[in-house]
Image (cartoon, rainbow, N blue to C red):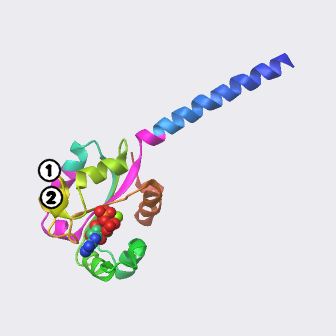
Amino acid sequence: MLVSSCWARISSRTCFWAELIRYAHGRAAARTLSIIKPDATRRDLTGQINARFEAAGLRIVAQRRLQLTRPQAEAFYAVHKERPFYRSLCEFMTSGPVVVQVLEGENAIAKNREVMGATDPAKADPGTIRKDFAESIEANSAHGSDAPETAAYEIPFFFAEVDIVG
Ligand code: ATP
Ligand code: MG
């Protein structure tokens, strides 16, 4: 009786620490989906944009250059279907190659959005990707997931787990 209650306490503590380690690792190794948009690939800015991610502690753990099809762009941006810019956005996103990538690092989602800057380059902080490179509010050089649930949809949209090497 005594032995079994001791064991129950030990194993519940082990569970607690295991959970804590898993949680900490999850936070430390958060991932986000990034897209270098057609306006940036057209001007050969991939290297400069990637250098900013890496300098900010965002490791590129998966990356592929591809041409989005119209159905892919429409599905990826389905959340914006009712917005007035949806058609134009899908047109723009299929106008040239994009580089899709998974970025990994502490608070990757927030960090990536900080490095990208505000959607509208006119409102973006100095030194951000969009301030320095974006052509317009639409052709704004980079996309980044905006929440963990979004990243959970967007990462598997382009990458299998075996394609992501941390
Ligand atoms: P992203 O999702 O690409 O990271 P974001 O989260 O900053 O950008 P959203 O509101 O999700 O901005 O808009 C998605 C994309 O739609 C923008 O990045 C931009 O390319 C385009 N977009 C947003 N607002 C406008 C607008 N008012 N006019 C034209 N295009 C827009
Ligand atoms: Mg968005």
Q: Quadrant of ligand 1?
A: bottom left
Name the amino acid, label 1: Gly
The foreground one among 114 and 84 is 84
Numbered tag placed on residue 131 in the rendering = 2
Horizontal relation, residue 135 to residue 106: left or right:
left
| Residue 66 shows in this picture | no
**What is the quadrant of the C terminus in the image?**
top left
Residue displayed at 42% across by 72% down: 79
Q: How many marks?
A: 2
Residue displayed at 29% across by 53% down: 113
Whole-percent x and y of residue 155? 42, 60
**Does the magenta segment cover residue 47?**
yes
Residue displayed at 42% across by 63% down: 154
- Quarter of the rendering containing residue 64: bottom left
Whole-percent x and y of residue 142? 25, 62
- Magenta range is 26-51
**Residue at numbered disc 1:** 127
Horizontal relation, residue 87 to residue 131: left or right:
right
Name the amino acid, label 2: Lys
Question: Does the closest atom of ligand 1 sit within 8 Å of the Cβ of label 1?
Answer: no
| Residue 152 shows in this picture | yes
**What is the quadrant of the N terminus in the image?**
top right
Whole-percent x and y of residue 138? 23, 72
Contact (CB < 8 A) between labels 1 and 2?
Answer: yes
Q: What crowding class fits label 2: few (fewer than 14 Cα within 10 Å), some (14-19), or many (20 or more)?
A: many
Question: Does the closest atom of ligand 1 sit within 8 Å of the Cβ of label 2?
Answer: no
SS at circle 1: loop
Whole-percent x and y of residue 71? 39, 81
Q: CA distance from mark 1 to mark 2?
A: 7 Å
* Residue farthest toward the right in the current orientation of the protein: 1
